[in-house]
Amino acid sequence: MGLSRIRPRSARDASPPSTKGRAAPVPNGETASEEPPRLQAVPVLPEPSPDEQPAAATRVMAKVIAFANQKGGVAKTTTTLNLGVALRELGHRVLLVDLDPQGNLTMSQGMNPDAIERSMFDVLVHRVPISDVIQRVEVDVAVSSIDLAGAELALSALIGRERALDKALVEVRDQYDFVLLDTPPSLGLLTINAFVAADGVIVPVQCEYLSLRGLVQLENTLAMVRENLNPRVRVEGIVPTMYDGRTLHAREAIEILEEHFGDLVYETRIRKTVRYAEAPVKGSSVLRYEPSGPAAQAYRDLAKEVLDGAKAREHA
Ligand code: ADP
Ligand code: MG
């Protein structure tokens, strides 16, 4: 059923080009008793010079990618941030959009979602321009706040509720090469908004607790969106995360993924390391936290694979 709609990368490449109480939650979802992370000045990478922007010169509109898996704790947020910073290092203009009311992405760049006045809630529900909620940190981030928890209910009463994000992105789509959408752990209206706005979906999958049933549900939701709201959206790739190659279990999980999804599974394995949990506590991507470490390199490798996939389609 749903799985059969997921074509291997080789077939896909031939398709036409697609025109978070007062005790602050910490990024690992636990509750910390310490002070919440505060807004801090983060060094901003210099703007890429025109020669460093081949993609900017040739592509007019941003490619929008949603990071989704209705299971929590599979590294959606970690992947959105670190892949975004890796693409930025390569000279691309990148916007990250935090669509999770828990605000982990916002927090992982050193900002406190509880202290944010205007967020993606106002963009989606009150049609505030998205440029009003973009913070320039390591990359540009359209921030979340706890208000976003009420967005699904508020949106459900509005006409065009599934297209609120797509409409909001029109303002900035020509200012970025990549817009990466971090979604909450559900297939609710916020995630549907991401699917409607997206050209592709990247699914992070934890190698330890592989849930193929969950992936089928995700693909069924995506198929509904494709049929009714956004014909161009499809799974772009599957990222195996928290991989521990020493365990047979993790190797088997990869085998199962490849058996079902073929070339859609990226070759890059995001290995299990505490670096990914340490970096957000410092309000930093792992690429800035430990630039020459293997954790940073993994996301640089993934960025190359994502770019290769995008190029293959452009030239198809
Ligand atoms: P999600 O957004 O899917 O809920 P997160 O990106 O917040 O998942 O990751 C869940 C937790 O796992 C976080 O504490 C994060 O720091 C940690 N984490 C993410 N990737 C890895 C990894 N490769 N190895 C070890 N821990 C990781
Ligand atoms: Mg998350």
Image (spheres, grey):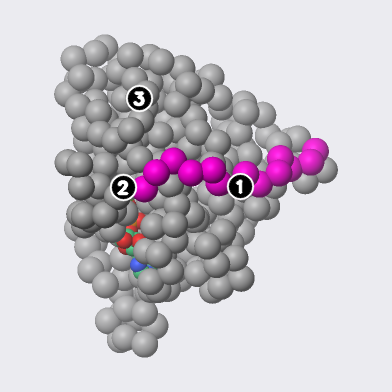
Q: State the residue position of label 1.
A: 43
User: Which of the numbered marks, if any, corresponds to residue 117?
Assistant: 3
Query: Residue at the front extreme?
Result: 35
Residues rendered magenta in the picture: 37-50
Q: Residue at x 40, y 34 (%)?
A: 143
Where's residue 311, x and y in %? 65, 49
Q: Main secondary structure of the magenta part?
A: loop
Assign the C terminus to one quadrant of the image. Answer: top right
Amino acid type at mark 1: Pro
Q: Is residue 275 visible?
A: yes
Q: Report if residue 42 lies within the magenta region.
A: yes
Amino acid type at mark 2: Pro
Q: Earlier in the sequence, mark 2 or mark 3?
A: 2
Amino acid type at mark 3: Glu
Q: Residue at x 43, y 47 (%)?
A: 110
Q: Residues within 10 Å of mark 2 (few under 14, many from 20)?
A: many
